[in-house]
């Protein structure tokens, strides 16, 4: 996941983030319901001196960054902490586990957490093992799991599931009233038979350097 080094000046930071996404300041101003020159004047002339709370929040959500980068005072920039669980979500036949033990916590950018719809205490970070979900997920990737999202739809999505005592990450869809789990890699072996228990939906991935 590419990262842009934070700029201590929120005006320069906004200009850099907009350019990285290919968005003009005029387009972002329109997204805020402002006149096209609003953000250009903010960046180049410092007028307004600070972005309003509403504008800052909307830009933070859209750009996927902390409000602190856009000039929020410290009380608006609390870290979003996520437990890292001692569970390997196998993208192969399934990892046998005795339980979910927290190895510690990691942090997500609060803006990203909001954009993903995550709620405090209802998310986890889990490591992937195996190749059956390639090319979307690779061995060693870490995934963010929304544990509040446990109801797959007919069109399906990628979920961490448990079948008996095995935990794995699979594509899961509701077909004819039954949950069906499949692998994305056509060369993968069959998914084990058994009752599927959904742990949560995969909403983000952090790829290990290769």
Image: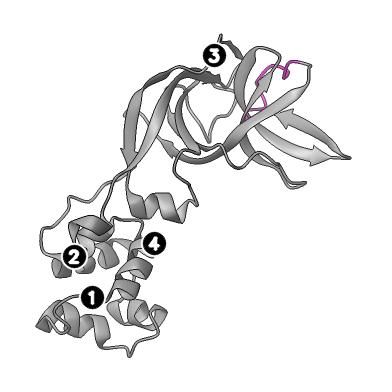
Nearer the observer, disc 3 or disc 4? 3
The disc, 4 or 2, on the residue closer to the chain's N-terminal end is 4
Residue at mark 3 to residue at mark 1: CA–CA distance = 46 Å
Residue at mark 1 to residue at mark 2: CA–CA distance = 7 Å
Q: Is residue 42 visible?
A: yes
Which residue is more in the foreground, 190 or 59?
A: 59
Residue at mark 3 to residue at mark 4: CA–CA distance = 34 Å
Tell me whether circle 1 and circle 2 mark residues in contact (CB < 8 Å): yes
Q: Position of residue 163 (x, y in %)?
A: 70, 18
Q: Is residue 114 magenta?
A: no
Residue 61 is tagged as 4
Tell me the SS state at disc 1: loop
Residue 51 is tagged as 1
Q: Position of residue 86 (x, y in %)?
A: 44, 17
- What residue is drawn where x is 74% and y is 46%? 153
In the image: residue 84, left or right of residue 137? left
Residue 99 is tagged as 3
Residue underneath mark 2: 71
Tell me the SS state at disc 4: helix
Which residue is more in the foreground, 196 or 72?
A: 72
Q: Is residue 186 magenta?
A: yes
- What residue is drawn where x is 39% and y is 62%? 61
Can you tell which quarter of the image residue 197 is in?
top right
Residue at mark 4 to residue at mark 2: CA–CA distance = 14 Å
Tell me the SS state at disc 2: loop
């Amino acid at each position: 996941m590419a990262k842009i080094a934070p700029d201590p000046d929120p005006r320069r930071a906004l200009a850099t983030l907009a350019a990285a996404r290919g968005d003009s300041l005029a387009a972002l101003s329109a997204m805020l319901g402002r006149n096209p020159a609003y953000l250009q004047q903010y960046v180049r002339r410092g007028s307004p001196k600070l972005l309003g709370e509403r504008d800052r929040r909307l830009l933070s959500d859209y750009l996927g960054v902390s409000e602190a980068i856009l000039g929020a005072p410290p009380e608006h920039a609390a870290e979003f902490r996520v437990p890292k669980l001692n569970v390997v979500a196998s993208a192969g036949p399934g990892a046998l586990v005795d339980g979910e033990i927290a190895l510690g916590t990691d942090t997500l950018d609060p803006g990203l957490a909001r954009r993903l719809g995550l709620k405090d205490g209802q998310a986890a970070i889990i490591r992937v093992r195996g190749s059956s979900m390639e090319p979307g997920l690779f061995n060693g990737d870490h995934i963010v799991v929304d544990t509040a999202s446990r109801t797959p739809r007919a069109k399906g999505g990628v979920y961490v599931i448990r079948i008996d005592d095995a935990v794995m990450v699979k594509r899961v869809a509701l077909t004819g009233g039954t949950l069906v789990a499949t692998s994305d890699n056509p060369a993968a072996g069959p998914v084990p038979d058994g009752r599927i228990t959904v742990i949560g939906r995969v909403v983000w991935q952090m790829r290990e350097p290769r």
